[in-house]
Image (tube, rainbow, N blue to C red):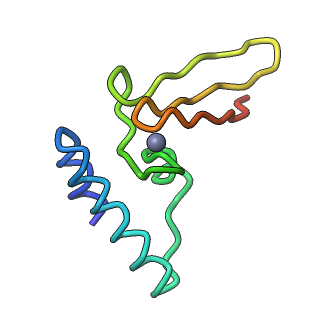
Amino acid sequence: MLGLAREQREDLKRSSRYVELARKIGTRYNVRLTAEEKGLFCRKCNAVLVPGKTKRTRLDEEAKTVSIKCTNCNYSYRKRYK
Ligand SMILES: [Zn+2]
């Protein structure tokens, strides 16, 4: 399911539906997405995050965080890195 979403990157609306479906199925059968898989999609609108296209990242070297922004819905969040 997630593989399909990745293949459909160019078609954002369609891929969002795949992600939604994958999430629903995951909830139903208690299958958890890996941290890596979670990072591939926007937490808010489920769009596939494509660097340079739907994803903007900015490093804050002092705070050791990376700001990830979804350009599809403008939702942004920070993540710590080592
Ligand atoms: Zn989004």
Reply above or below: 64 against 14. above
* Residue 45 appears left or right of 8: right
Q: Position of residue 10 (x, y in %)?
A: 18, 38
Numbered-mark total? 0
> Residue 60 is drawn in which quadrant?
top right
> Residue 2 is drawn in which quadrant?
bottom left
Q: Position of residue 17 (x, y in %)?
A: 28, 61
Question: Which residue is at the far front?
Answer: 73
Question: Which residue is at the far bottom?
Answer: 29
Q: Residue at x 50, y 49 (%)?
A: 36
| Screen quadrant of the N terminus | bottom left
| Screen quadrant of the C terminus | top right
Q: Residue at x 25, y 53 (%)?
A: 15
> Residue 53 is drawn in which quadrant?
top left
* Residue 15 appears left or right of 28: left
Q: Position of residue 68 (x, y in %)?
A: 57, 30
Q: Residue at x 65, y 25 (%)?
A: 66
Q: Residue at x 42, y 76 (%)?
A: 24
Question: Which residue is at the far right?
Answer: 63
Q: Position of residue 27 (x, y in %)?
A: 50, 79
* Residue 77 appears left or right of 37: right
Reply above or below: 79 against 57. below
